[in-house]
Image: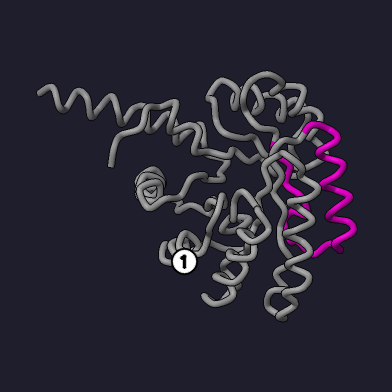
């Protein structure tokens, strides 16, 4: 694969800090770090959206809001209300956890409404659907991923990183199932050799990665490029 610059590598990351114990000062600190790193997006719980919007204004880093997180078990009306609120408060990238029980129960009509509602109420902002792949059969995963594309969703995401992890072949199922402008975002990355896995999946076609470890991975990649350059000079 062609090696990315550190700046290009950083834009593959949606940094997420969703721990419910985080304070405002900690959120502001993470927003400043995200701005310095130049990541794609900083995601927080929706109560912090206006704080993050204030910190990131003019930085080029998207203000991420994780809606119906982490279970996706809210009513459609509540999901729409939360999306509307965060957009009004400055969110520019909205994640919505889809109703896993509806998928497993075959209520595809509700999933269609959720994806279409996200697209409509996100407006011109980025719309990303979180699919808990760890609970789904391959056929269910393919179908819901295609529904994301049908609704014009920007990213189909492989999970919340709360319920479980995905597998590489299932990420490829998602890559093979998206169409139009829809791309794939992966979370629940492996705990070891994470950078190697990220580079592997970028080569496969994954565009974004959701993780709280963006700073560490970007610095690790910077050190790797330096090591690689020095090694090639020998």
Range shown magenta: 64-90
Quadrant for the C terminus, please.
Answer: top left
Q: Which residue is drawn at 69% across and 49% down?
A: 95
Q: Is residue 88 magenta?
A: yes
Q: Residue at x 44, y 36 (%)?
A: 217
Q: In this view, does 208 lie to the left or right of 222?
A: right
User: In the figure, 36 relative to 181: above or below?
Assistant: above
Picture residue at 44% right of the left edge, 26% below the top: 7
The residue sitting at 70% across, 33% down in the picture is 63
Disc 1: CA contacts within 10 A as few (<14), some (14-19) or many (>=20) = some
Q: Nearer the viewer, residue 115 or 64?
A: 115
Residue 44 visible within the image: no
Q: In this view, does 4 lie above or below 148?
A: above
Secondary structure of the residue carrying tag 1 is helix
Give the left or right position of residue 4, taking residue 77 as reference. Answer: left
Q: Can residue 85 be seen in this view?
A: yes
Above or below for 128 versus 31: below
List the residue tagged with mark 1: 173
- Residue 156 coordinates in the image, percent (x, y): 59, 55
The x, y position of residue 195, in whole percent, is 39, 43
Residue 4: image location, x then y, percent: 35, 32
Whether residue 36 appears in magenta in the rendering, the answer is no
Q: In the rendered view, does 90 fall on the left or right side of 30?
A: right
């Amino acid at each position: 694969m062609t090696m990315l610059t550190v700046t290009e590598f950083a834009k593959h990351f949606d940094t997420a800090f969703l721990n419910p114990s985080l304070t405002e000062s900690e959120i502001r600190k993470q927003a400043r770090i995200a701005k310095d790193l130049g990541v794609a997006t900083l995601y927080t719980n929706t109560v912090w959206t206006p704080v993050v919007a204030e910190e990131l204004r003019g930085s080029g880093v998207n203000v991420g809001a994780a809606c119906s997180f982490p279970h996706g078990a809210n009513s459609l009306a509540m999901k729409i209300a939360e999306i509307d609120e965060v957009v009004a408060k400055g969110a520019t990238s909205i994640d919505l956890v889809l109703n896993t029980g509806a998928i497993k129960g075959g209520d595809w009509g509700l999933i269609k409404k959720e994806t279409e509602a996200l697209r409509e109420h996100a407006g011109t902002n980025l719309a990303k659907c979180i699919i808990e792949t760890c609970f789904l059969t391959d056929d269910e995963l393919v179908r819901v991923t295609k529904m994301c594309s049908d609704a014009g969703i920007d990213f189909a995401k492989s999970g919340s990183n709360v319920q479980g992890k995905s597998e590489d072949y299932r990420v490829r199922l998602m890559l093979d199932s998206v169409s139009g402008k829809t791309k794939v975002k992966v979370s629940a990355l492996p705990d070891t050799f994470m950078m190697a896995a990220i580079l592997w999946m970028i080569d496969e076609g994954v565009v974004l990665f959701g993780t709280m470890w963006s700073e560490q991975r970007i610095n690790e990649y910077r050190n790797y490029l330096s090591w690689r350059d020095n090694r090639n000079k020998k």
